[in-house]
Amino acid sequence: MSETVAANSGDMDRQIVQAVCGEDTLSSALVGMSDLSDEILLCILHHVPASDLLLNVSNVCHKLQTLCRDKTLLTHVSLSEEYLADDLLVQRLLKQLANQVQSLSLNGCYWLSGSTLDYVARCTAVTHLDITGCRLTSLRLSRLLSSLCFLTSLAFDVTAGFNSAQLSSEAVGTLSRLSELRQTLLTPSYGVVPCCAQLRKLMLQFDISDVTREGVGVCCQLMVGQSSVPHYQQLEEFTARLAPGEVNQTLLLLYLAVFSVHVPKRLRVFLVSIPGPNPAHWPAGPSLAQSLGQHGDLEALQLPRSWLDPLSLKRALEGNSPKHLSFSRCPALWPQVFQSLLEGGVRDATQLSSLNLSGINQVLYSECRSVEDHLVPGTISRLAVSCSNIKHLNLMHTHYHHEHSSELGGETHLCGSLAKFRQLRSLTLPACALSDGLNTHHTSVNNTSPSPFFLGLKKGPRLGFQNYKPGSDPSLSGDSTSGLAQLLASCSLLETLEIIGPGFVSALPRLEPCSRVNVEPRGMCAWARGVGDAHLASLEALPRLHRLTLAGLPGVLRGTGLIQLTRQCKDLKVLSLANMGSLKIMNYFPALLDTIKQCTQLQELRLEQPYLNANESFFEALSSCSHLQRLCLISRSGTFDPSATETFMERCLQVVMCHMFMGGTLVGCRTLQKALLDRFSNERAALSVVIYPLQHEDLPSVIRDIPLTLLDRITLFQSHVAQPPHLSPL
């Protein structure tokens, strides 16, 4: 590697010489990389991973050796997603970091052995340590904490067999000084929370299955005594994210028991995310929300739908200037949210940077929607004016039905209103929000009078089921994109875009039971069916686009829009596609191959389609993505070519995650999985290969074995836009 760096340095010197000598107006003196100032070189080296700095670049010359050890480069070191860093490399790196590093993240380094973590104890100056996803026992944690006496921030996993009684007195002393703690709970436990009396930030992720591998129910009874009940006297931020399951909700309520008696005076962030439509009831929710608003420093708020009522929300927001608000799946709060944000219910709405309104105006389909359940462009326009600095906006599971005729009051298309959010960096939209109106080629209207439930103040009758025809002319799929064009022209800074059809549910079983109850049947929204290739082609106007999710879009027939989109969006790094066009035949497969070939910077591809044929041509196209690291394919009736898969893995040297949940036999899947692991594991320490029949009864157990850091990635199309920031690195 050092030889490569030296060669690159020489090439750079020659390029600079050619550039200088090629201009008559410039000096002909030779200029090399070594002639650049230390400040410029440090700026360049700042983008080089720490492992390369210390183990490779520093060996090029004496000058670089000195600069690579500059404290500004080594104070904060992250090895997250450094998939090529094996145990030996990390051990060498930690030896050289010694007392220089102050913030060290091994988040998601699931492949490192437990003995490698022992080297972290040598970094005695560390104040912030993130070892989430690493192999850790109670005794190993005790040894680490005993050596890191300056530690103020810790993130780790609480796994089965964890016992806080095994922590030494020195370790407990270190915990008593922590101000930040993030625990990922994989087993019912308080973890180290009872030892942390000075916590200001507590971040929890609950990922406990309701049953063991043997099918035995998990018990959530904890030793609730004076020494084990968490106390949050100094707490300022509390966040929790739950995976599905009753055990997770029961354990959360135990963590929250103290809040029912006493709410910390300094608490300014309270974020709780529970999947599913029926979160466990917590009577103290409304009173806690009101307490949060009393001191005027509330920064972030998210509560489950049953924990908050409009009055308590109003009191929580009054006199505050929140930065993050999430009201996902809280339709009862819909009027109060906009009243507070638009009519002076908050002190300074311009401080708001992240707003999650996913499903806020949605009732269950069986309950029938009224006009109030549709987004109104005028209201969104006012919101854009009041909350002018919003960067992250989530409107998934909402509806907007635009008509060709002008609306009352001169209101424009919803996308025209969204265009006023000029600071947007990430956006999630329902597919129907992109439509310019119903296309007569895609609708069939019942002759009977519409039900009053489907009538609105400004909307025509809601249309019934449509017969989607895969072979129809693709040009009919959305004749106009003028509304979308307004949004794209004004929000060119968008880096993350998610467009989700109203009937989409991923087939992956982890969140599927919870997500299915939150969506209506596929095809019920005629406006969403009108979004097709022309709309996708329009997205080429987003040159900064890095992450794109498209799911549940039956109007995409041939996928030609994908080709045009990726031809212009050169920096696309994450692409997620699901249930595009017909579910019975994958009409856009040829366009998909051309699309993939153009995604030369792609690092992650997630693809879900019922009849995906991962054949030789598919993997041949995928081999063009030389930077690809993570691949996930989900196809209930899909097929794959084992030989082509192996050839692809041989060509794409950076792929460390190959997950394929397809059709086929269990024997065939296991044979390919074993072949890939046997051939590539030695050279790719972080390699994770899971190939399994999607409909096999043991799939949930197989998924449970996948490292959590990867499991969150393959849980397809669970929107991350405007989600609580509590899982970001410390």
Image (cartoon, rainbow, N blue to C red):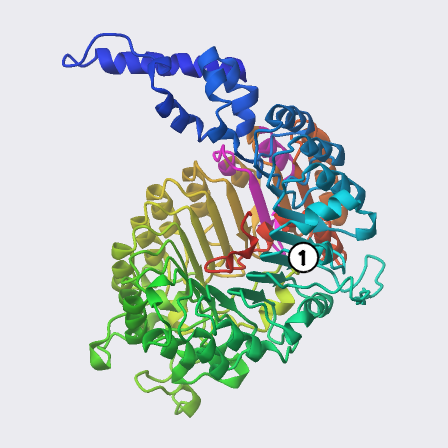
Q: Can I make out residue 574 in this image?
A: yes
Quadrant (top left/top right/bottom left/bottom right) for the N terminus: top right
Q: Can I make out residue 664 in this image?
A: no
In the current view of this chain or complex, which residue is farthest to the top? 29
Query: Which residue is label 1 attached to?
Result: 197
Range of the magenta residues?
621-650
Residue at (34% x, 67% y) in the render = 348
Residue at (49% x, 37% y) in the render = 621
State left or right for residue 439 relative to residue 727: left
> Compared with residue 624, is residue 331 higher up or lower down, i.e. above or below?
below
The residue lying toward the viewer, choosing from 196 and 548, is 196
Asked whether 647 falls inside the magenta stretch, the response is: yes
Asked whether 222 falls inside the magenta stretch, the response is: no
Residue at (69% x, 58% y) in the render = 207
The residue lying toward the viewer, choosing from 230 and 76, is 230
Question: Residue 704 in the image: x percent, y percent?
Answer: 72, 53
Question: Residue 433 in the image: x percent, y percent?
Answer: 36, 68
Hey, which quadrant is residue 127 in on the image? top right
> Compared with residue 20, is residue 111 higher up or lower down, i.e. above or below?
below
Question: Residue 650 in the image: x percent, y percent?
Answer: 60, 29
